Amino acid sequence: MTQPAPPSTLTLATWNVEWATPRNHAPITERIAAMNADILVVTEGDAGVLPAGGTHLDGGTDWGYRNTKPDWRKVILWSRYPMRSIDGQAPPGVPGRFTMAQVLTPTGDVTVIGVCIPWRDAHVRTGRRDALPWGEHMAYLKHLAEVVRRYRDQPLLVMGDFNQRFPRTRAPQQVFDAINDALDGLVVITAGQLPGLTRQDVDHIAVSDHFEPQQVWGIDRHDDSGRLLSDHDAVLAAVRIGDQSSI
């Protein structure tokens, strides 16, 4: 009997759930389950919002700020397929904002980097209060560029909270140039205002040229009654991956 071909399309999703407060935890969990993602990156959340089954990794609790909630994580990477952790890649000083793994999809291995890039005022008026605007953001991008260069010749995804919009809106040009340099060789397939959204988002999915986007869309941050679930919208993409024996 001929075996069916492995699935060649992955559904990707990422969402900053703004710590999923008790009031919003259940509807956020339900919405994430309904996304039916194969690979998911949740930022500013906890493992309780993840879909049932699958496996997950996170960046830990050390992201440069005092954390009083032991379950909170800046970045969590979840997959319905098995994963192998890739160690030793976290940016110095902000390991909690980064996680990385190989996802063992039926078509072949995919390297996934989950990020929560610091916002423009990280440690400017809060935390250590010793940084300049965009300083922490730029330092993170410098390290991210090194990691992307190392892995971009293989199937690679970078997903999470980029804290910048594509195309550029209010970020200084040099900051926008830095994130493009960090993602050199990848395409941000969630750029622009996506179907389902009323604004550009800062949560993004970037892919290497091993992937062909089939559909990209967003899910609004409000529920059906208009209640705000998060300060971020969710973004999703269906991407086709090639037969890796030919890559």
Image: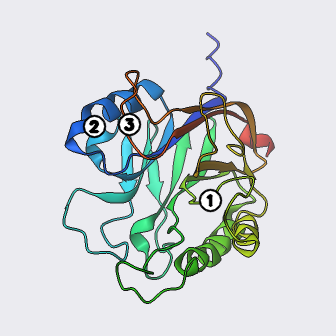
Residue at 25% in and 45% down? 21
Question: In this view of the protein, can residue 114 be seen by the observer?
Answer: yes
Circle 2 sits on which residue?
24
User: Badge 3 local density, few (<14 within 10 Å), some, or many (20+)?
Assistant: few
Q: Which residue corresponds to mark 1?
A: 164
Gap in Å between the C-alphas at discs 1 and 3? Answer: 21 Å
Residue 96, quarter of picture: bottom left
Of 158 and 231, the residue lying toward us: 231
Quarter location, residue 150: bottom right
- Going from N to C along the chain, the mark reached first, 1 or 2, is 2
Q: Horizontal and vertical percent for residue 233?
A: 51, 40
Q: CA distance from mark 1 to mark 2?
A: 25 Å
Mark in the foreground, 3 or 2: 3
In the rendered view, tell whether residue 13 sits above or below residue 34: below
Reading the image, the residue beneath label 3 is: 228
Q: Nearer the viewer, residue 197 or 69?
A: 197
Which quarter of the rendered picture does the N terminus lie within? Answer: top right
